[in-house]
Every structure is written in structure tokens, then in C-alpha cells.
Image (cartoon, coloured by chain):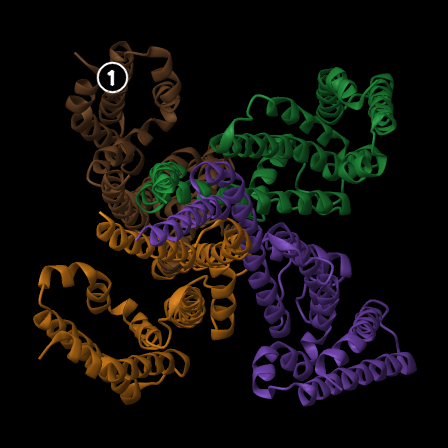
Chain colours: A brown, B orange, C purple, D green
């Protein structure tokens, strides 16, 4: 079987499993199940992790250029190895949506905007769940409910940083750094997309006025052809003259 | 009646009603009227809401491609459905001002700057009023006067986020997230507009030196026409010769 | 006398007076002179204000198109009318330095960088002095020394906003909003200048390969001229033939 | 000996010494050695400083245009003169890595990204060490461990600025301003690189459609050559006719 076919077949099932993973993760953190329920949730998440790892291994085996594939999928490796960032796997949803938007320049920007919005929503959601899990029972922690965690995630990803809620654990602070970096990237992507759009809009009119198009060169070329035909006629008439 | 005509007729009245809406909203929050006065203010705002909803329904009925129109006016639908963001309707003022500025590249940037300034002023003003309304009587709230609310709105929209005043209610935090997102967009638009301007200014001189214009192609074209005329003269003279 | 001549003559004296203004302003705030000294400092600053106002009036009288001049110098009018922002007048120093840098694209970016650095230094300095003056004796104020004021100004203009020192007076908060807006502009200008530079560097190689230059069009034009001369020779030879 | 040769020879040894410098610096701050150990660490750092100063002097002597070299290496002079920023010398590592990436447009962006990542890691690390050294024993200081210092450095360089940990000493605040400025530059560089990439991607397709290439001009030029040959044949045939 080819890698492409494997990816086509597994795309939607894996996305569904990713969403299931997030669902179970959220339920484990928000509902705080005890005993058997907690164990069941843990078991489901471990099983899903095995599925994700198997997909990684199978994809690599199917890849024609294994080293190239490995270098291009370092993030996937990290996702498989670091259980903490595994929920990010759900970003695969975006890859699927991608196929809908592959037509020229505007589409690129459209895709970027979609990516950014989806990534931010995902990061804020998962970041809130993860920080709540990390901080909740830490001594001196202030992020002790999902509402507070969500609020903190928005304050952090927008780089506003009020400081009314701040993480106090090492895990919490690592998550915070990830959100901050995402925030910087977010500002960068939004600004860059806007800049590209404005540059295009502003230069659209100017270009029409100053740039010469293929049509104009074609017109010049046709005139030259006409000249050549006339010269050919001359060349035909003058020899008889000679 | 056509949609365009309806929009032309209702543009200014609706803008005036929007400003009235904000005025009544501000008066209700700042003056804190009691009894009959409060009821009157509420009645005016409900009446205005009915007018806005009617405009939405009529516009949709008049639109030739209803589904297209619906997709393009999702924000308007939100404005009609969510009484909270209804004051944003006043941004229609900007649409009206638009007509004054539709001439080429510089105008686009001019319009963007105008939009940004007007949106920021509006967002800060309405955000301050709304946050004051949401927080004022909440236990533990620090945003308890319009001055403090204004200060908080500026600190938030610029993403400075001192944290000396922070919202504690759910509504307040939703408003804060909206202002933060607006702040990110604000930075993006300012930077992008500046970038477009600098790119243009820097490339202006270069272009003059390296780009060929339509004038130059025209000159080449004229030379070809002259050549053709001369060839025609030759063709005329040689046949008599043949 | 012409406006241009007046500006050339007054440029350096007015810049010197602006620096003197800032010096006296700083001395008044930092040394907190008492009695006669305070009165003297105040007198000097009032006198300087009269000089600035006179320059504004004379410049307007000398301007050929008064309304155009008025619209282009609204900031100057504000500087004359609002004693608080008068120190900003020292930004005239930048205008003087400008003359040194008027050669092409790189120069524009060089000028922008210079403007930004100079404006930030100025804004931070004057902002620190002004906030110290506004806050120092306010009840509950934390910005009570020049060191703290400088620190606060940097924390604000970079939009970091720790919140360890925040203004509590209305004047202080207006100054803070000005610094925040300056910070947003600062980020915008730096990013935009960098973007322009990167876009230029990246596209430099590409352009050389795909764009046709005036030289190439000239070469085509010369070939056409040669063709015309040969046709002329033909035209001269054929009539004798007819 | 030529300057270039000297730089080639000393590049790696100096980079190694820079890393050693940072290592000793970090050990001195984190392990807080006492007595003889402290003196030894200090002696090593002073010796390394002498080596760096010697490299500066020798490079200048070897430089063909000393004044040009001096102006281009003001930062190096600062590094030699200001012991505090001497650790930044390790940024020389980047210069070495540079050589690997000098092929066209994408490479420029690749290099920029590498620079940014390396600089941020370096700045956060060295900034954390330096702030810890400056603050640790200050009265009222909150940055009292390396973990807290690292957390503070990330919060500052991303301009989030929670304010849960803030410097209270003059040295600490100078370091903070440096990190803030680095943060602004960081946002700027990331955004600008993204903008350049998006602008390129979006315009790639458009260019192919509207721009005329050298190939097309060449085609026109060849047609003209063909015309000239035919005219030459005519000129050759008509004289025999005359």
C-alpha cells in the first residue's frame, strides 16, 4: 500500500480519535472522575496513544524516502513521544479542511486565517485544560477552575498579561511559555496576512497603469509578423525585377 | 424596491438611530436613572432593536441572492440576535464615510487608518460602558467608575495589561477578550499599513529605474507603424516596377 | 521674507530653545526648586512658550497657502495650545537631522530607524518627567522618583505592563495612554521597516532574472532604427528605379 | 597576516572560549562558589576578557581600513568595554553557522529564523543568569532562584508582563529593558519574515500571468533580426537593379 492511500484512509478516523482523545482528556480534568472511571479514562487515552504511535510507525514504513519523511514529521514524533502535547494531534482536522481551499492567492490567505483561528481556539482550549490539571491542587495556585483557566489562557495568548492569575508550578509555566510563543506567532501571522493583503490591494491599480502585459508584447509581435509578410511580398516581387 | 435603494434611504436614519442607541445606553449606565426613567430608556432601546431587526429582515427580502447576502451579513445577524453587541451597529457610520474615499492606493490606506481610529474610539467607549455595567456591583470588582473603565479599556486594547484593574465577572471577561482581540487586530492593521507604505516608498525609485512603462512600449509600437508605412510605399512603387 | 528662509534661519535657534525648555522643565521637576528659583523657571518656560507661539504665527503669515499650511501643521498648533505637550517641540531636532539623509531607498529606512530611536528616547524621557510631576504627591501614588518613572515608562512603551507601578491620577493616565499608543506605533514601525528590508533582499535576486529593463527596450528600439535606415536606403534606390 | 585569515583561525577557538565564559559565569551564579573557588572563577573570567580584548586590538591592527572597521564593530567594542554584556560574545556562534546558509531568498529567511531562535535562547539564558545575580540578595526582591529568573525572562521577552516577578534593582531593570527591546525586535522579525513569505507565495502565481520575461523580449529581438536579414537581401538585390 502507498503512503498517500494510507493517509487518505486514516485521515478521518484519526481525526475522530483525536477529538475523542480531547473529549476524554477534558472529561478527566473537568469531571474529576474517581476510581474505576478515572482508570477507564486513563485506559482509553493510553489505547489512543498506541493507535497514534502505530500510525506514525506505519506511515514511516510506507514512506518512499524515509529520512525525508522523518525530517518533515519531527512534530509528529514529538506528539507521539510527549504525551503532554498529544492533544495537538487534533490539528489534523485542519489538514482535511485544507483540500477545500487550493485556488490561488486569496485562498492562501483564507487558509492562513482559518489555520490561525482554529489553532488559537485549540490552543486556548487545550491550554486551559492542561493548566487547570497542572495547577489546581498546587499550594498558592490561583488557577483553580476551568473558567479562571480559560480567562488566563486568553490573557496570555494575547500577550496582555494582567497578572491576576499566574501559574506557580513548573508544568504550568512551561504551558504558559508555549501559549506566549503561540501569542507572538498569532500576532505575527495576523499582521503578515493583513500586510500582504494591503500591499496587494494598493499595488493592484498601480500595476495596471505601469506594467506591460503579455497582451501588449503579443501586439508588438503581431505587428512584426505583418511587417515580415510585407517584406516577403517585396522579396518575391524584386527578384522578378532583377 | 431594490436593496441598493433601500440601503441608500436607510443609511443615515439608521446611523442616527445607532448613535441614539449608544447615547441612551451611556445615559442608562452613567446616570443610573431610577424607576420610570429607567423603564423609558429600556423601552427606547427595545424599540430601536425592533427597528434594527426590521431593517435586517427587509434587506434580506430585497436581496436578489438571499443566501449570498446571508453569508456576507453574518455579523449583522449577530448584531440583531445578541443585544450585547448591538451598539457596534454604529460602525455603520464608517460605511457612510467610505464613499468619500474611493480613489486609488493612498486612499485605501487612508480609509484603513480612518477605520482603525474610528473602531478603536468606538470599541474603547462602548467597551468601557459595557464593562462598567457588568462589573460595577459585582463583589470584589475594582472597575467601579467610568474613569476606571476607560483606563482599563486602554490598558487592555494596547495589550499593556498592567493588571491594576481586571474584570471579575463572566460578562466582563468576555468583553475583555473582545477588546484584547481588537487590540491584536489593531497592532496588525497599523503595522501592515505602515509596511505597505514603506515598501511602496522604498520601491518607488527603484521601479522608475528598472521598469518599462506602457509609454515605452507605445514608442516601440509607433516605430513599427512608421516602418510599415515605408514598406507600404515600397510595395506600391515596386509593383509598377514589376 | 519667504517661509522657507524663515524656517532655515529659525531652525537651529528654535531647536536650542526646545532643548533649553526641556532642560528647565527637567530641572523644575527633578530639583524641585523653591520660591524665587521656581518662579524664575516658570518665567523662562512662559517666555519660551511666547517665542514658540510667535514662530507659529509668523510661519503662518509667511506661508503662501495659509489653509494648506494650517492643515499640515495641526500638530504644531496643538503644541502651541497645549502647554503639556510643548516639550515634544524638541522633535524638531529630527527635522534638522533629516537633511543629512535624502538619498534613495536605504536612506528612507535609515531615516525611519533614526526617527524611531530618537522619538522613543524623547518620549521615554519627557514621559518620565511628566508622569513624575503628575503623580509624585498624589495619594496612593507609587511613581514617586525619577528612577521609578523611567522604569515605568519603559515597561509601558514596550507594552510589557508589569503593573508594579501604575499611574493613579487623570493626567498620569492620559500620559500613559500616549506612551501606550507610542509603543504600538513603535512595534509597527520596527516590524514594517524589517518587513520592507526582508522583502527587498529576498526579491532582489528574483527581479534580476525575470524583469526586463529599460536597457533591453532600448536595444530593441535601436534595432528598429537600424531597420528604418535600411528601408530609407531602399526607398531612395527604388524611386530611381520607378 | 591578513584580517580574514586571523578571523578564520580564531573563529572556533573564540567561540569555544565564549561558551566557556558563559559556563563559568553560570557556575559562579548558580553554584555560588565560596573563597578560592570564587576567586578562581573570577580569575578565569578576567583572563578570558584579556583574550577578547586582545582579539579586538589585533583585528583592528590587521584591518586595512581601520576607521571603517571601527565603525562596523562598535558592538564588539562595547562587548570588550562593558564586562556586563560580554557573554553576548557567544553570539559569534551564529556567524559560524551563517556560512552554511548563503543560497538565495529562502536561505535569507532561514538564516533570520535561525538567528532569532538562537538569539532568544541566548538572551533568555544569559538574561536569567544576570538578573538572578543582580536581584538575589536585594531587599524586597522576588527573583531569588534560577527557575523564577527563567520564568521572568520569558514573561518579559514575550511582552506578556504578568508582574508576578519584577526586578527592583537598577541593574535588574536595565537588563529588563534590554529583554523588552529584544522582545519587540523578536515580534518584529517574526512578523516581517512571515509577511515576506506570504507576499512571495501570494504573488508567485500572479507574476507568472502578468509579467513579461526576458525570454519574450528575446523572441521579439529575434524576429527583428530576421526582418533585418530579409531587408539586407532586398538591399543587395535592388542596387544591382539601380
Work out whether residue A164 or residue D149 is closer to the camera in this orientation and state it.
D149
Q: Label 1, on which residue? A: A55
Q: Is residue C132 visible?
A: no
C174 vs C236: above or below: below
Residues packed near mark 1 inside 10 Å, few (<14), some (14 to 19) or many (20 plus): some
Q: Is residue B148 left or right of residue C37?
A: left
Q: Residue furthest right?
A: C36
B184 vs B43: above or below: above
Q: Position of residue B179 (x, y in %)?
A: 41, 60
B235 vs C125: above or below: above
Task: Name which quarter of the figure residue B120 lies in.
Answer: bottom left
Q: Chain of mark 1?
A: A
Task: Name which quarter of the figure residue B221 lies in.
Answer: bottom left
State the count of labels. Answer: 1
* Image point (40%, 59%), residue name: A206
* Image point (40%, 83%), residue name: B31
Work out whether residue C54 or residue C147 is closer to the camera in this orientation and state it.
C54
Q: Is residue B152 left or right of residue A194?
A: right
Q: Position of residue D73 (x, y in %)?
A: 77, 36
Work out whether residue C165 or residue B221 is closer to the camera in this orientation and state it.
B221
Q: Position of residue D12 (x, y in %)?
A: 71, 16
* Image point (41%, 41%), residue name: D200
Q: Position of residue D180 (x, y in %)?
A: 62, 46
Q: Is residue D85 visible?
A: yes
Position of the N terminus of chain C by quadrant: bottom right
**Secondary element at tag 1:** helix
Work out whether residue D108 or residue A91 is closer to the camera in this orientation and state it.
D108
Amino acid at each position: 500500500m502507498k503512503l498517500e492511500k494510507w493517509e487518505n484512509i486514516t485521515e478521518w478516523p484519526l481525526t475522530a480519535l483525536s477529538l475523542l482523545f480531547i473529549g476524554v482528556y477534558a472529561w478527566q480534568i473537568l469531571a474529576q472522575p474517581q476510581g474505576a472511571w478515572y482508570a477507564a479514562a486513563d485506559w482509553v487515552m493510553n489505547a489512543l496513544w498506541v493507535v497514534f504511535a502505530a500510525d506514525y510507525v506505519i506511515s514511516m514504513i510506507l514512506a518512499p524516502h524515509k529520512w525525508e519523511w522523518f525530517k518533515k514529521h519531527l512534530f509528529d514524533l514529538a506528539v507521539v513521544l510527549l504525551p503532554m502535547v498529544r492533544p495537538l494531534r487534533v490539528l489534523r482536522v485542519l489538514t482535511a479542511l485544507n483540500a477545500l481551499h487550493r485556488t490561488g492567492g486569496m485562498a492562501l490567505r483564507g487558509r492562513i486565517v482559518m489555520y490561525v483561528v482554529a489553532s488559537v481556539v485549540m490552543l486556548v482550549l487545550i491550554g486551559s485544560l492542561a493548566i487547570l490539571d497542572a495547577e489546581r491542587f498546587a499550594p498558592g495556585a490561583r488557577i483553580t477552575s476551568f473558567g479562571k483557566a480559560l480567562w488566563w489562557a486568553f490573557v496570555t495568548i494575547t500577550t496582555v498579561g494582567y497578572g491576576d492569575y499566574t501559574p506557580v508550578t513548573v508544568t504550568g509555566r512551561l504551558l504558559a511559555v508555549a501559549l506566549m510563543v503561540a501569542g507572538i506567532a498569532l500576532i505575527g501571522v495576523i499582521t503578515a496576512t493583513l500586510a500582504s493583503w494591503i500591499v496587494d490591494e494598493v499595488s493592484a491599480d498601480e500595476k495596471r497603469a505601469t506594467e506591460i502585459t503579455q497582451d501588449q508584447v503579443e501586439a508588438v509581435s503581431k505587428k512584426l509578423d505583418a511587417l515580415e509578410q510585407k517584406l516577403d511580398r517585396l522579396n518575391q516581387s524584386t527578384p522578378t525585377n532583377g
